[in-house]
């Protein structure tokens, strides 16, 4: 930037950095997406095309920012995990946060017409925040929190819209019917009243979308002894099998239990 | 959000707020826009269509966020002034910052094809930061800083590309010719060597783009006395003539001198 | 500090700075001073010696830190104003805050025996916070807030202890008598029931303690012309008559109205 | 606090909290202690009485704040570890930081005459900072960093003052003699030139001072079976053997190697 006697105004900028060696999660949320989904006639309770457009935007974020190792999305929100040692922008909070939000927004609009055949009526807006977590346990619980939320919301919404769309009730009546019901009762209503077996619904609706990179598989173990091989695999892991390379996969799987994380130890490495 | 035993992870979120009664400026910058402008064959030194697309995105931000009272843009950057008493999002920094960045990005991509007839090759990304300024003087100096920057960069770039495009020199040679020259010398080179009168160039290139709202004019003064009228106009100013309503205007004017600010006292009201 | 492979831990330190050109107020409060005043048999409702010991500690802070231009104390609290352009510790919040708190605490313990003839039973502890204010108006209102608090508390406490000490009531009864009374009623109770004219009480109890520096008086105007004299006085003001030099005065005056501030324009200069 | 129309100034206060589940270290440093040690004729290179007075102040901090589980001091500095789940002051940074600094300062002045027979010439001042560490490893490395610093400084200072005091050299000459020497060379100078066996010096000088609580010993295992006993000991550990109770011990031991930490697993529990 050109210098001038006005340049002193730069001094007012703060320089907030993410705590070193700490996991960070950026979560973005759609603004006024109730109106947005009405305007664009989204299917209820889930619009497959809109969710896939969201996923495509999250995939772009991960391709742009290799230090994002995991993303999880549901409805109009998406969460992104940054590895704890990311040196991105010298760990400046505002820069990292805005890059994720801007990249996501940009790709969502850019990809829209690939997924939905209704024209985009106006530019959608997302907001974001960044939260830091000191321990792997917190990261696990953060993503569990979001997936439990997905499950609870989807069961409710599926029941609600069945009552309205198939049962011919008003939205007010549907709310009343569901008030105070527990999970088992909603399953019952769905199955007995509307013939819907919740368990057979699209996994994307029930579990949300999980984006991870698939690191290339480890090569065959050579014949000539354990020590050298150990070193070779160590080097391979260091070079490429680290969760920041490999192509992005979109999964719809459980991330509350251990399996998902045990299969991808790099996600929680600190 | 649905409650669960994982909900404690919300406790890790901080709650950084903008200092009350303080001006805030959000500045966004294009990421890797050198590559972006090459990919989309932007005209040098200025691409009128791209600048107008930037302006349209800034206009969308102001229409979405009435507490943004002023915007200034040049090249691949834009600055937005928020009035010091904005209650938006309880003044949470991250929310305000990301809303501006997301709205800008979204509108830029959304409006692209209205301004440029080359397809957008990939989603562009912007980053952003927010800075707080306690006094009107600082706000004046911030925007002066950016407009001086506009002038210095544009004079340099105009000279540089004249030497390259009209003079047939390499970029390296052009840099060398301009090294150490002051403004007057660049004006001379432009005029004598390439017949370009810098002062007649497009104001948008020389001064950047200034977005403000034009508040509706004050109504005629009624006949029945001074006191009531004073009250009436006070109320009008309070109700509508406050820089947060009225349609957004795109100007290319000096914002370093006093005139611009004297005509819009609400911009610096605190 | 000596270097070692452990030195990386310094990276975790943040670097929070006070916003430039902004007033800062550090306020300290005694911890568990109810117990402290009981242990040391403080007179009720005010202990002159303890207040003077507080004042002496505040005076030490101002002598140690010339960028503190004003202090105000009541009961077990003290507030310190830092001039908006202080370069102290590169404006690092934690360093400025802790220096004030430590200097105050240190002087309070150091000076104790000069003011009170009861031995200090244990080390007293204070906590502190720092708040930034963008405008002179906020600084005025901050100190007005504290002085109004002084007045309200002192009127209550004076009435309360008169009822207990002179009226022979229990503390519970005194609370009940005062519940819901306004100022005028408390004045009445004091005067009619206990012969106390509130207005004649010690100003220190009613207004708190105000510490400022008395800049040296401007010298006589010399005979040889206005311009040179203006320059001379300007230089004097710049050199010494600026509220950061001169000896510290302890006053018990109104700081809610304009007079105090008009007489000391440097306090609110920005 | 009494309410008034000025009470809005409270809104300007921020509310910075320590990240949950994260270790915090408060470090305090003496201000201008070179002058302070000269004024009070401290013995060189170490003044046993002054160090013991520092230790007594740190002990007071630990007795006042049970969530401080460990302290380490050398020269004019002291570091305090807070357990990661401390709920103190709702984890507000400024309050925690200032309480430690104030309590330390207060006790240092209060205890002075118990340790030194020269009167305190003026109130000493300390500043402080607080740093957060996500992992036990960082806590270990932080304290290792300080103890390595102790060792390096003490070896240098011991050599330096031997050369000056016993060798009759000037301070400038002593600096020159030590310039570029490694540890072994300083040991040699001490032993050969001045008959000082560094290894036999007071452990407090070489290792600094380590303050921890000694939890009460676990009681005998009762005869009636493993399960109940396990529960009983678990409860005991939960109730009392947790590093926040028990009397404070002042040790001068190695805290770089594993032993110290292995014997006190509660220090790094998270």
Image (cartoon, coloured by chain):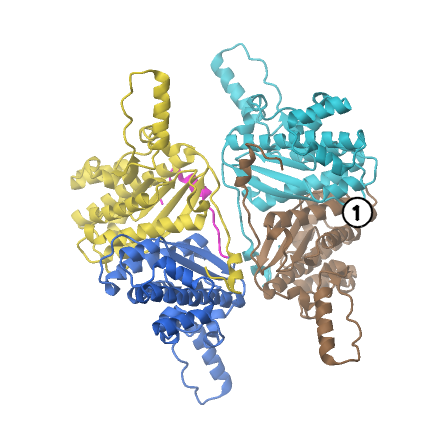
Chain colours: A yellow, B blue, C brown, D cyan
Quadrant housing residue C184: bottom right
Q: Residue furthest bottom?
A: B223
- Residue D84 place in picture, x, y as percent: 53, 35
Can residue B2 be seen here? Answer: no
Q: Residue at x 55, y 39 (%)?
A: C10
- Residue A251 place in picture, x, y as percent: 26, 37
Per the image, is A25 magenta? no
Q: Residue at x 35, y 43 (%)?
A: A80
Can residue C98 be seen here? Answer: yes
- Residue D170 place in picture, x, y as percent: 78, 36
Residue pointed to by mark 1: C111
Judging depth in this view, the residue of A196 and A151 nearest the camera is A151
Quadrant housing residue A155: top left
Quadrant housing residue C145: bottom right
Judging depth in this view, the residue of A129 and C27 nearest the camera is A129
The answer to whether D134 is drawn above or below residue A124 in the figure is above
Q: Within 10 angstroms of label 1, few (less than 14), some, or many (20 or more) residues?
A: some
Judging depth in this view, the residue of B15 and A6 nearest the camera is A6
Q: Is residue C183 left or right of residue A44?
A: right
The answer to whether D50 is drawn above or below residue B45 in the figure is above
Q: Residue at x 21, y 40 (%)?
A: A189
Secondary structure found at label 1: helix
Q: Is residue D118 left or right of residue C96?
A: right
Q: Which residues are magenta?
A: B1-18
């Amino acid at each position: 930037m050109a210098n001038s006697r006005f340049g002193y105004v730069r001094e007012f900028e703060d320089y907030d950095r993410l705590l070193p060696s700490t996991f960070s999660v950026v979560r973005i949320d759609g603004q006024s997406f109730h109106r947005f989904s009405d305007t664009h006639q989204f299917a209820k309770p889930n619009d497959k095309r809109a969710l896939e457009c969201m996923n495509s935007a999250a995939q772009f974020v991960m391709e742009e920012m290799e230090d994002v190792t995991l993303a999880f999305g549901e409805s109009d929100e998406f969460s992104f995990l940054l590895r704890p040692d990311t040196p991105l922008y010298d760990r400046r909070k505002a820069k990292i946060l805005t890059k994720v939000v801007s990249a996501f927004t940009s790709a969502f609009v850019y990809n829209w017409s690939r997924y939905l055949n209704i024209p985009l009526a106006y530019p959608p807006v997302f907001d974001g925040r960044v939260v830091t977590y000191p321990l792997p346990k917190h990261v696990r619980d953060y993503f569990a929190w979001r997936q439990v939320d997905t499950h609870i919301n989807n069961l409710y919404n599926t029941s609600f819209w069945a009552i309205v769309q198939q049962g011919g009730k008003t939205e007010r009546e549907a709310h009343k019917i569901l008030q105070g019901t527990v999970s088992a009762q909603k399953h019952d209503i769905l199955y007995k009243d509307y013939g819907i077996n919740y368990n057979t619904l699209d996994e994307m609706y029930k579990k949300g979308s999980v984006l991870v990179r698939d690191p290339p598989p480890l090569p065959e173990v050579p014949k000539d002894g354990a020590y050298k091989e150990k070193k070779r695999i160590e080097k391979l892991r260091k070079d490429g099998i680290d969760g920041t390379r490999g192509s992005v996969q979109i999964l719809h799987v459980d991330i509350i239990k251990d399996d998902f994380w045990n299969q991808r130890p790099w996600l929680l490495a600190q």
